[in-house]
Amino acid sequence: MKRRMVGLLLFAAWTLPAMSSDSAVFSLGEISVTAPADGGQLPAGSTIDVQDIREQDRETVGRALQMVAGANLSRVGARNEEMAYLRGFDLRQVPVFVDGIPVYVPYDGYADLGRFTTFDLSRIEVAKGFSSLIYGPNTLGGAINLISRRPTRAFEGEVGGGIGIDDSGERNNFRVYGNVGLLRESWYLQAGVSVLDEDGFRLPGGFEPVAAEDGGSRDNSYRRDSKVSFKLGLTPNATDEYVLGYVRQDGEKGNPPYAGTRSSVRYWQWPYWDKASLFVATRTQFGEHVLKVRAYHDTYENSLFAYDDAGYDSQLKRSSFRSWYDDYTNGLSVEGDFALAASNRLRLAYHLKEDVHREHDGGEPIQTNRDLTQSLAIEDSIAVSRSVTLVGGLSYDYRKALRAETYDLSTGLVRQDTGDNDAVNALAGAFYTLEGGASVRATVARKSRFATIKDRYSYRLGTAIPNPGLKTERATHYEVGYGSAMAPTWYLDAALFHSDIADLIQTVRIDPALCASPPCSQMQNVARARSTGLEATVDGELGHWKIGANYTLLYRRNLEDDAIKLTDTPRHEFFAAAIRSHGPWQYGGSVEAASGRYSSSDGAQRAAGFAVANIKGGYRTDSGVLIEAGIRNLFDRLYAYAEGFPEAGRNYFVQFNAPL
């Protein structure tokens, strides 16, 4: 399969015309809080463009989000998953969308951002607490929307690739990708293909060996991800658009064992992590009004094998198993966009989503869970004057569990209690434009998240008791923000934010006699929490240098019990990057830094703070081919996002991008 994909890309390198890196975004995939006059976005979120993604070599969505103020990368080390937090909210509370379609895993609500590559994207839109209600349910802390490309010329294309070399001189990874676009008067085609392959990474020289990891090449740290995507769009006139799209991701990965001294060691591998989405998106205009429809079928297939030891060849212990998931989601979204007046834009949306989770371990029966979620939303933007825009919205979400099955050795296959939950969400915002183009915003939003299937029904390998009656998590967000051009080429955006969270779902220890493998726990609505902080982003040019930086200060507190720590978020985080162009040459670097963070709620595990630097340089030929070389983790720093799971040491790379 890999050889076929590489061969296809090489063929494309010789046959496809050019694709510029500023290909138009797929506007049908965008969802935002809109201005009434032109439907453009109000300043209520952050955007990462493809140019910034490429300049900073952010090949996965998780890595790309490090460039956004208020977002921090986290590593669920025990599962080897890239996660992100937005102002302290995790991916269960901040769902991931692709072109406006939810793609989070039905069972636990997560999306491993390390499996989502960026080679075929045009931008990533990040909405925080004040995210549009048009997204639908479960956006407790915001939303992450991955926007694909749309061609702008009759023929355009690109190919790229590169290799990575570790500190010992061995090639340990490669990537190759290609995109092509065809644009005609009444239709267009956009397609992409990519492969990202890593044999493993080398640990920094400062790592001290432990029983489960002797240093050097990190054990069981391989990953392989391939992706194919296409869209066929019909454009019968200047306003209407009808699109059929398909995305398939195939992945596999190892799970590096815990390399600390304060937790048990798992020997896990994921033989496959496959996801596919088939969707239809339409836009039909009736005078000044627009009707948008999205219908989709999303599948998720996954296997997890747990082994006895680092040999990864025996499964005789009770802790060893083979588990398979076979999930799917069917969904429909209908959105009406009504221009009631030049100063008033009203949007209505209805969402229907069916999630089906099927799993079993070797020798066990298949357990099936099925949820049906619906949402009805209304959102209105009114320009009360040339400088003031007001936004208000209200939505109602309803979730019904239609089927719930669990399996435990002591009970066998059991039908669990079903039931339903509902929630009302609301938002209000005021946006004021000052003379000279500066802007001030003040927003408040009340959001919710339904407990996932895993939250309600999982036995967690015999150490937990299901809780079908979990209530809905709720949060109220407040923000004031300011944006201004400080000079002709410099821009500042800053925000103060505060979030109160109620009925936070948390693991609680219970009577050991109630479960098969003590210690025993249950997911319960026991906590109130608070997140408060500030963000600041600066972008501009200094001579030939393009410079961008952001800083986040985040205070999170468990209001029920200060002794129970809120995990995986640093108090301070900083990112800065600089790129300089000098004729055909360009070079630059970046630095990312964070203070320490807790990796366990009891505070026993804590990852230390760090600062990591990266550099690179490149040359663009007269034909537009860019050839680059660089170093990641320049100073070979030993650092980790989760205690006991160190990240890669110094790595060298060479890469190219060819618009043909």
Image: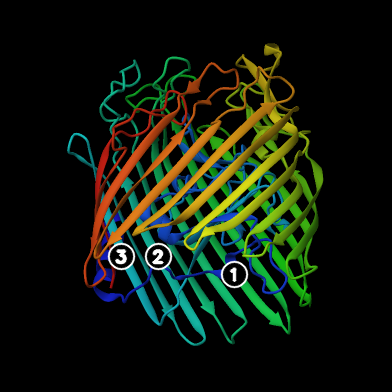
- Residue depicted at x 18% and y 34%: 168
- SS at badge 2: strand
- Residue depicted at x 43% and y 49%: 60
- SS at badge 3: strand
183 shown above or below 438? below
Quadrant (top left/top right/bottom left/bottom right) for the C terminus: bottom left
What is the three-letter code of the residue carrying label 3?
Val
Quadrant (top left/top right/bottom left/bottom right) for the N terminus: bottom left
Q: Are marks 2 and 3 in contact (CB under 8 Å)?
A: no
The answer to whether one can see residue 91 in this image is: no
Whichever of callouts 1 and 3 sits on the residue coming sooner in the sequence is 1
Instruction: Decide if residue 604 is on the left or right side of residue 406.
Output: left
Q: Which one is closest to the eye, mark 2 or mark 3? A: 3
**Of all residues shown, which one is farthest toward the left?**
169
What is the three-letter code of the residue carrying label 1?
Leu
Q: Which one is closest to the eye, mark 2 or mark 1? A: 1
Whichever of callouts 2 and 3 sits on the residue coming sooner in the sequence is 3
Q: Mark 2 points at which residue?
A: 192
In the figure, residue 292 lies in which quadrant?
Answer: bottom right
Mark pair 1, 3: CA separation = 25 Å
Frontmost residue, 19 versus 556: 556
- Residue depicted at x 60% and y 34%: 554
Q: Mark 1 points at which residue?
A: 28
Frontmost residue, 172 versus 453: 172
What is the three-letter code of the residue carrying label 2?
Gly
- Residue 589: where, in percent of width, then height? 33, 47
Q: Mark 3 points at which residue?
A: 159
Whichever of callouts 2 and 1 sits on the residue coming sooner in the sequence is 1
The answer to whether one can see residue 558 in this image is: yes
Mark pair 2, 1: CA separation = 18 Å
- How many discs mark residues in the rendered view? 3
